[in-house]
Amino acid sequence: VNVSLDLPSSIAASFLVSMGMYMTGCFHEDGLADSADGLGGGWSKSQILKIMTDSRVGTFGCAALGMFLLIKVQLLGALGASHWQLYDCSGAGPAIIVSQTVARLSA
């Protein structure tokens, strides 16, 4: 069975990234934004920790998050359509499966 929505790769990649963010509750993106705010806006260790515990997102957090999402969508879109064959997989789908598996195994 071959199911395809025939979406452009950039739209499919955007959908994939948004579903990943939904499934994780944007937990990792929030951590990235807090870290960027703390490292970009704090001069002392106490300032950095205070900024990181603040619930608001600052300029550095917005910039880091925007660049991260833009790069992630573009890289996934560049991988193209998924090709699933035994011992011959390529595209964004297999790349996501392998990267998530390796990440869980290495943690």
Image: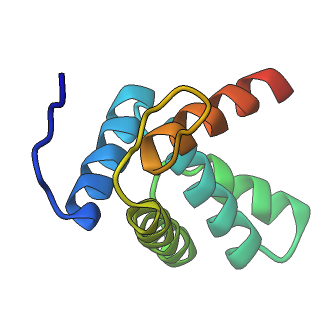
Q: Nearer the viewer, residue 53 or 69?
A: 69
Task: Give above or below for 62 relative to 26.
Answer: below
Q: Nearer the viewer, residue 23 or 73?
A: 73
Tell me if residue 34 can be seen.
Answer: yes
Q: Residue at x 14, y 40 (%)?
A: 4
Q: Residue at x 70, y 77 (%)?
A: 40
Task: Give above or below for 31 relative to 64.
Answer: above
Image quadrant holding the N terminus, namely: top left
Task: Give above or below for 95 relative to 37.
Answer: above
Q: Residue at x 28, y 57 (%)?
A: 14
Task: Give above or below for 21 relative to 13.
Answer: above
Picture quadrant of residue 101: top right
Residue 84, position as x, y percentages in the image: 43, 34
Residue 33 in the figure: left or right of residue 14: right
Q: How is the image coloured?
A: rainbow
Residue 49 in the figure: left or right of residue 73: right
Residue 87, position as x, y percentages in the image: 62, 31
